[in-house]
Image (cartoon, grey):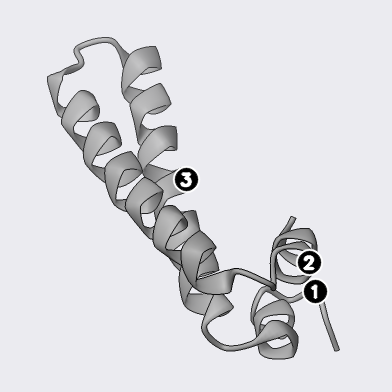
Amino acid sequence: FIRIFLIGYSAVPQLWMDVLSVFAVLSVFVGVWGMLKQKRLTRFMGYSGIAQMGFIMFGVVSAGSLGHNQAIQSFGFGS
């Protein structure tokens, strides 16, 4: 996914980084807010997964600012 994202959408990187930044923040807030209100463990874990995807998107956004080669290496996919 990282290679496809960074190579395929390299023509408009700032637009995609802004969009992913907004989705990352929303995902973390929705996940944590929903998680705090749950009493069932399964729903609690579901909202926790939503929040975790937000944190992963933060990593993708920050790696996108490094450039293609460093971003691939930072995720452990390159040599």
Which of these two is toward me, 50 or 8?
A: 8
Which residue corresponds to mark 2? 3
Q: CA distance from mark 3 to mark 2?
A: 18 Å
Q: Amino acid at mark 1?
A: Phe
Q: Amino acid at mark 3?
A: Met
Q: Residue furthest right?
A: 79
Q: Is 41 above or below relative to 34?
A: above
Which residue corresponds to mark 3? 53
The residue at 15%/28% (across/down) is: 36
Would residue 67 appear left or right of 72 to someone viewing this image? left
Would residue 45 appear left or right of 57 to someone viewing this image? left
Q: Quadrant of the C terminus?
A: bottom right
Badge 1: residue crowd in 10 Å (few <14, some 14–19, many ≥20): few
Residue 20 lies in quadrant: bottom left
Q: CA distance from mark 1 to mark 2?
A: 9 Å
Instruction: Report if the CB atoms under discs 1 and 2 are less than 8 Å apart.
Output: yes
Find numbered disc 2 in the image and state the secondary structure of the residue it sits on.
helix
Residue 18 lies in quadrant: bottom left
Q: Quadrant of the N terminus?
A: bottom right
The residue at 68%/72% (across/down) is: 11
- Residue 77: give its label: 1
Would residue 8 appear left or right of 65 to someone viewing this image? right
Instruction: Report if the CB atoms under discs 1 and 3 are less than 8 Å apart.
Output: no
The image shows a total of numbered marks equal to 3
Q: Residue furthest top?
A: 40
Q: Is 20 above or below relative to 50?
A: below
